[in-house]
Image: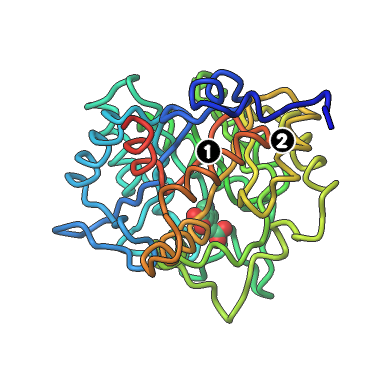
């Protein structure tokens, strides 16, 4: 037998494999999610996200310095406020925890590093929903847009390079773009969580930010249904039409078909969020000695890139960046 195709020829040496590799994974393709908390005197470890903590302003700076030195593409901030209220006013207050952190990081890093702010209300609301809740318990889309607009402007004023609306309200990107432009922030980039699914993989994140949805509720009336594929394209197109500069699919591994679809159909930069539950599963199995955690992480993040994402938000950013530069 002499098969015409001999694919193994190109796999013989590491140098050949590197030469013909279709996908690359570099530290610059990774964005690190970070938590900054109000009222802590030292960082508080997050048990369900081993290696991560709710940061003080000082420990946040230290962590960002390490990530910056490792060459990661950026960081995205989530706030853990001391006090919550019905409307989540901590999200847009100029002294809100994320605004304080943004100003401070901006002072140290300027435009050397892409600093993003997650834009949502759930960390700041007593009921844990991503928007304004009506008396009957439903989430009021248009009342929420106003609060997102305010939050975007506060984050921009504090120095965010990118704002990333994650609440899945209809029209959120348009409302935010309009508000940013009106206030003179037309340079601020919008990274839209375009196809965000109602996923059980956000569990560790909700621990990390101390969010519990009231009355055993969930986010199924605003986040997408895992059974739907075409719907993601409609969501993403709407976001691009409204002015999204970058779009995101979330979570990552369970939704690689969506990443591939959006890559094929749209030409804006695309990223995916390898979420808390995805990180926690790898970490837990690695801690048992059942898998090689770093190797699995690199394989998964490479798969996200191969499916078509330009970059990946991941709790592995620091660890994998170090591993890649070995
Ligand atoms: C909402 C938000 C969530 C995550 C990012 N932004 C949680 C949710 O929708 O319940 C999850 C991220 C993760 O699991 O890593 N502000």
Q: What is the tally of numbered marks visible in this picture?
A: 2
Residue 301 drawn at (x, y percent): 53, 42
At horizontal 81% and vertical 29% (from top left) the residue drawn is 265
The secondary element bearing badge 1 is classed as strand
The secondary element bearing badge 2 is classed as helix
Q: Is residue 219 or residue 307 the one in the foreground?
A: 307
The answer to which image quadrant residue 202 occupies is bottom right
The answer to which image quadrant residue 103 occupies is top left
Camera-nearest label, 2 or 1: 1
Q: Is residue 178 above or below residue 253?
A: above
At horizontal 79% and vertical 29% (from top left) the residue drawn is 264
Q: Is residue 198 or residue 70 the one in the foreground?
A: 70
Q: Label 2 crowding class (10 Å Cα cut-off): few <14, some 14-19, many 20+?
A: many
Residue 90 drawn at (x, y percent): 39, 53
Locate the N terminus and report the quarter of the image it occupies.
top right
91 to the left or right of 44: right
Locate the C terminus and report the quarter of the image it occupies.
top left
At horizontal 70% and vertical 40% (from top left) the residue drawn is 259
Ligand 1 has an atom within 8 Å of the beta carbon of the residue at disc 1: no
Residue found at the far front of this picture: 1
Using the numbered discs, state the Cα–Cα distance from disc 2 to disc 1 in whole angstroms.
19 Å
Q: Is residue 183 above or below residue 278?
A: above
* Residue that numbered label 2 is attached to: 239
Q: Is residue 136 above or below residue 271?
A: below
104 to the left or right of 189: left
* Residue that numbered label 1 is attached to: 312
Residue 121 visible, this angle: no
Q: Label 1 crowding class (10 Å Cα cut-off): few <14, some 14-19, many 20+?
A: many
Q: Is residue 89 or residue 73 the one in the foreground?
A: 73
Residue 197 drawn at (x, y percent): 68, 56
Residue found at the far bottom of this picture: 215
């Amino acid at each position: 037998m002499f098969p015409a195709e001999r694919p193994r020829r190109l796999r013989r040496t590491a140098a050949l494999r590197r030469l013909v590799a279709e996908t690359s994974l570099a530290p610059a393709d990774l964005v690190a999610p970070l938590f900054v908390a109000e009222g802590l005197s030292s960082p508080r470890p997050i048990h369900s996200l081993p290696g991560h903590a709710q940061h003080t302003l000082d420990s946040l700076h230290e962590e960002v310095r390490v990530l910056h030195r490792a060459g990661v593409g950026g960081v995205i901030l989530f706030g853990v406020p001391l006090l919550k209220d019905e409307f989540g006013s901590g999200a847009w207050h100029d002294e809100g925890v994320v605004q304080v952190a943004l100003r401070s990081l901006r002072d140290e890093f300027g435009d050397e590093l892409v600093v993003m702010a997650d834009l949502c209300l759930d960390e700041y609301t007593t009921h844990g929903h991503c928007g304004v809740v009506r008396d009957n318990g439903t989430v009021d889309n248009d009342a929420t847009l106003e609060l997102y607009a305010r939050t975007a402007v506060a984050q921009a004023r504090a120095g965010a390079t990118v704002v990333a609306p994650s609440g899945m309200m209809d029209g959120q990107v348009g409302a935010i773009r309009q508000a940013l432009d009106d206030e003179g922030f037309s340079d601020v980039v919008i990274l839209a969580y375009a196809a965000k699914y109602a996923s059980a993989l956000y569990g560790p994140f909700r621990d990390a930010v101390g969010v519990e949805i009231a009355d055993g509720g969930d986010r199924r009336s605003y986040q997408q249904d895992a059974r739907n594929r075409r719907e993601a394209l409609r969501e993403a197109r709407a976001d691009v039409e409204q002015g999204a500069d970058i779009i995101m699919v979330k979570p990552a591994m369970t939704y690689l078909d969506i990443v591939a679809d959006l890559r094929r159909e749209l030409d804006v930069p695309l990223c995916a969020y390898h979420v808390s539950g995805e990180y926690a599963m790898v970490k837990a199995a690695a801690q048992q000695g059942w898998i090689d955690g770093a190797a699995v992480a690199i394989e998964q993040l490479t798969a996200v890139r191969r499916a078509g994402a330009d970059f990946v938000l991941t709790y592995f950013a620091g660890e994998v960046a170090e591993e890649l530069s070995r």
